[in-house]
Image: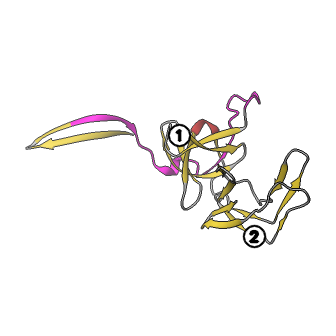
Amino acid sequence: GWAIVEAAFRGDTVRARWPLQIALLDGLPLVTEFDDDTTGNSRTDSLTPGRATPSGSYEWFFPTRTRAAVTARLNDDIRIRLSAEAEAWVPAADARPLPAGLPPPRAVVGSVTLSGQQDRVVLRIPLTERVPFQVVESERSLALRFYGAVGDVDWIRYGRDTLIQHLSWSQSGKEELTFR
């Protein structure tokens, strides 16, 4: 229904409809999967942008089929839970609801492998399921943070002739795992 703003002063009351609709969160899908191909023509970049605030600047890019728990909706954006410590806003048009009762995504990250190629290094990170992630650059390093993930990284295989001098990982939050 529509929200009503009410002001009362010395026995007089004024009511006005506020241009805001309110709905219970139960009406939203609790878990969603991203797919930016809203027209079904397969001409997309297969990425859903994430923002720290609705209509803000892009902070994350979530590949198609990434799953996340929905916690709120504001106009054309939904808020997703990345981890206990982080959330993001994404376009509601890019979110497909999944069947009710499906648990939020949670991945276990296994041991990783670095493979040197002629013009690049390939980093293979095994995940039990696709979860949101973020790449953060600095002058001489990269950080790759997985949300809704826990580590079971027994070893890091460097391979031969890799450009990477050191790779480390840490459980940077209760549900956040970071490679540096």
Q: Could you tell me the amino acid type at mark 2?
A: Asp
Q: Which residues are magenta?
A: 15-44
Residue 73 placement, left or right of 122: left
Q: Is residue 126 above or below residue 44?
A: below
Residue 53 makes an appearance in the image: yes
Q: Mark 2 highlights which residue?
A: 152
Q: Could you tell me the amino acid type at mark 1?
A: Asp
Q: Secondary structure at mark 1?
A: strand
At x 63%, y 53%, the residue is: 100
Instruction: Give the residue furthest to the left.
Output: 10
In the rendered picture of this protein, how many numbered marks are placed on residues? Answer: 2
Render colour scheme: secondary structure
Report x, y in % for residue 107.
71, 61
Which circle's residue, 1 or 2, is located before the other in the chain? 1
Report x, y in % for residue 12.
11, 39
Within the magenta stretch, is there residue 88?
no
Q: Mark 1 highlights which residue?
A: 77
Quarter occupied by the C terminus: bottom right
Residue 3 placement, left or right of 14: right
At x 84%, y 51%, the residue is: 121
> Which of the two residues, 137 or 125, is positioned nearer the viewer here?
137
Residue 44 placement, left or right of 1: right
User: Which quadrant would residue 141 be assigned to in this image?
Assistant: bottom right
Is the residue marked by circle 1 packed among few (<14), some (14-19), or many (20+) residues within 10 Å?
many
Q: Secondary structure at mark 2?
A: loop
Residue 29 placement, left or right of 33: left
Report x, y in % for residue 122.
84, 51
Is the residue marked by circle 2 packed among few (<14), some (14-19), or many (20+) residues within 10 Å?
few
Residue 99 makes an appearance in the image: no
Report x, y in % for residue 155.
81, 70
User: Which quadrant would residue 41 be assigned to in this image?
Assistant: top right
Within the magenta stretch, is there residue 22?
yes
